[in-house]
Image (cartoon, helix red, strand yellow):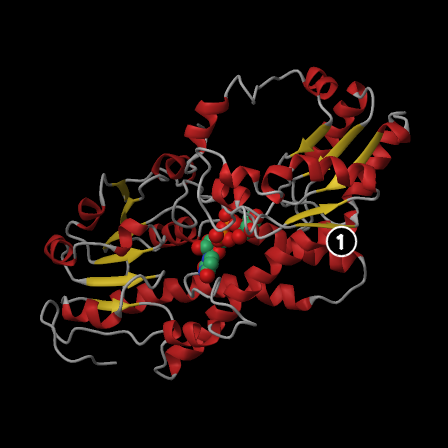
């Protein structure tokens, strides 16, 4: 399995060569299928716009192989009007307009929980220009929307059920394309918003965790994606916020808000770096344990990972870093420049050995259940700087740690290792 994704190895083993087959022969795949899902990458180009060259390349190949009516489904995250471009490319290659439809069917799954998100979606969005093509997608998703899947032996449990099956919304292709970009941008906005509030909370001794609970209980706001931290990363949010902003600019629409979302996220990483700096005074020669490399827990993906970004800066500042991540170490070795100041440990306690401070950078469950006594014994100085707010400041303080987190007052041990009352 090329990626770390829960349930995927088991599902693939179960269905391989039965209901799923792999081929490098695109033409034979196209000939045999009624619907063709395009799921190639749409990386960020220099201008912030999505680079659609992979989409164009695959559409040109499809054009050469098309025979009979096909529904071409955009699954990749693409800017509005990509459906129109796909149509134009097919026309240019002389494909009969009656022999295909282009449908937008954006994917909302998250890495790490992709399978459950797919099988138990909040919604399925189908952007189609006519009923014929919408019906093909309705048939494909019928096991989820009709509920039959949830009754099936071996069905993976999740929020949907026979009584509450997945909902499918049919819109125009343009609306579906925008739903995807707008949803990701809105979630990124929620995170930047709570991060900005966290920075304010710190200055007035308020607690961002209580604030997020208090805000999230308002059903109009909701509790999710209100976790303050060291900024969002991953292969989607940074790229999609930039791409959506680019689309708005192209259309002459002022959507400066998206620029602010991005700026707050960048600043959040600087703020965290400065927290490390102010907890340790100087970084040259300091030994730091970095817990987490992935952009979030439950994945080995390090694309746009705030952890990787921070480690690079710490190394540049002369610190020695020992990193540990349950899944992302191999991938990190490929992007972090080899250095005698960068080491990898086989577990978190080994990473923390003789550390001047422990940094929590990824929200792996393993990092939320650390044996604090063992950690305290391992480190040189009991300082934890937590970019994911995985602990209660009081608990850390009682366990003898100086604890710095996000949007909450830092608690400094007056004398390292000996808990006393918190001082600011
Ligand atoms: C995201 C969207 O959630 C998903 O719908 C879309 O299909 C793809 O992009 P993903 O990139 O897998 O999914 O990760 P997600 O769980 O959304 O987290 C993105 C980033 O935001 C991570 O760095 C995460 O740590 C951060 N995050 C998330 C926060 O900082 N706070 C939160 O409350 C939630």
Q: Position of residue 219 (x, y in %)?
A: 53, 72
Q: Nearer the viewer, residue 361 or 356?
A: 361
What is the quadrant of residue 112 in the picture? Answer: top left
Q: Quadrant of the C terminus?
A: bottom left
What is the quadrant of residue 300 in the picture? Answer: top left
Question: Visible in this render: residue 164?
Answer: yes
Q: Nearer the viewer, residue 166 or 37?
A: 166
Q: Nearer the viewer, residue 221 or 184?
A: 221
Q: Please give the name of the residue rendered at 60% of the width and 37% of the height, measured from the top-left corner.
A: 143
Q: Please give the name of the residue rendered at 38% of the width and 62% of the height, measured from the top-left corner.
A: 273
What is the quadrant of residue 78 in the picture? Answer: top right
Q: Position of residue 230 (x, y in %)?
A: 42, 61
Q: Nearer the viewer, residue 255 or 393?
A: 393
Q: Residues within 10 Å of mark 1 (few under 14, many from 20)?
A: some
Q: Please give the name of the residue rendered at 69% of the width and 58% of the height, measured from the top-left corner.
A: 245
Q: Is mark 1 within 8 Å of ligand 1?
A: no
Q: Which residue is mark 1?
A: 175
Whether residue 33 is situated above or below residue 309 in the rendered picture = above
Q: Quadrant of the N terminus?
A: top left
Classify mark 1: helix, strand or loop.
Answer: helix
Q: Residue furthest bottom?
A: 204
Whether residue 125 is situated above or below residue 41 in the rendered picture = below
Drawn side of residue 6 relative to residue 147, left or right: left
Question: Visible in this render: residue 232?
Answer: no
Q: Position of residue 146 (x, y in %)?
A: 62, 42
Drawn side of residue 217 relative to residue 291, left or right: right
Q: Position of residue 409 (x, y in %)?
A: 31, 76
Q: Please give the name of the residue rendered at 78% of the width and 64% of the height, measured from the top-left corner.
A: 253
Whether residue 221 is situated above or below residue 47 in the rendered picture = below
Disc tally is: 1
């Amino acid at each position: 399995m090329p990626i770390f994704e829960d349930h995927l190895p088991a599902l693939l083993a179960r269905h391989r060569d039965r209901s799923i087959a792999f081929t490098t022969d695109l033409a034979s795949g196209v000939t045999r299928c009624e619907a063709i899902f395009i799921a190639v990458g749409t990386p960020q180009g220099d201008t912030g716009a999505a680079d659609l060259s992979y989409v164009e390349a695959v559409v040109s190949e499809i054009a050469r192989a098309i025979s009979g009516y096909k529904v071409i489904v955009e699954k990749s995250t693409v800017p509005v009007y990509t459906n129109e471009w796909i149509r134009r490319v097919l026309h240019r290659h002389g494909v009969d307009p009656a022999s295909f439809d282009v449908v937008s069917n954006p994917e909302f799954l998250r890495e790490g929980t992709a399978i459950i998100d797919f099988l138990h979606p909040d919604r399925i969005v189908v952007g189609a220009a006519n009923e014929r093509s919408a019906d093909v997608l309705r048939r494909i998703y019928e096991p989820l929307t009709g509920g039959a899947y949830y009754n099936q032996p071996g069905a993976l449990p999740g929020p949907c059920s026979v009584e509450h099956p997945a909902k499918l919304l049919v819109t125009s292709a343009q609306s579906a394309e925008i739903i995807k970009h707008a949803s990701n941008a809105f979630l990124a906005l929620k995170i930047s918003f709570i991060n900005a509030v966290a920075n304010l909370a710190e200055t007035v001794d308020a607690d961002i965790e209580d604030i997020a609970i208090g805000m999230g209980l308002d059903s109009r706001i909701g509790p999710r994606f209100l976790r303050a931290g060291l900024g969002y990363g991953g292969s989607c949010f940074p790229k999609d916020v930039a791409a959506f902003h680019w689309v708005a600019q192209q259309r002459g629409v002022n959507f400066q808000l998206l620029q602010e979302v991005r700026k707050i996220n960048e600043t959040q990483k600087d703020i965290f770096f400065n927290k490390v700096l102010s907890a340790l005074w100087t970084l040259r020669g300091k030994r730091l344990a970095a817990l987490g490399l992935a952009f979030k827990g439950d994945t080995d993906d390090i694309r746009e990972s705030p952890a990787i970004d921070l480690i690079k800066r710490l190394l540049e500042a002369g610190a020695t870093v020992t990193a540990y991540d349950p899944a992302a170490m191999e991938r990190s070795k490929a992007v972090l420049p080899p250095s005698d100041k960068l080491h990898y440990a086989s577990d978190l306690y080994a990473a923390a050995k003789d550390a001047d401070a422990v940094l929590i950078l990824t929200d792996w469950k393993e990092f939320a259940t650390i044996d604090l006594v063992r950690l305290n014994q391992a480190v040189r100085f009991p300082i934890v700087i937590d970019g994911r707010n995985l602990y209660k400041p009081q608990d850390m303080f009682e366990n003898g740690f100086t604890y710095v987190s996000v949007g909450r007052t830092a608690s400094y041990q007056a004398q390292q290792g000996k808990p006393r009352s918190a001082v600011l």
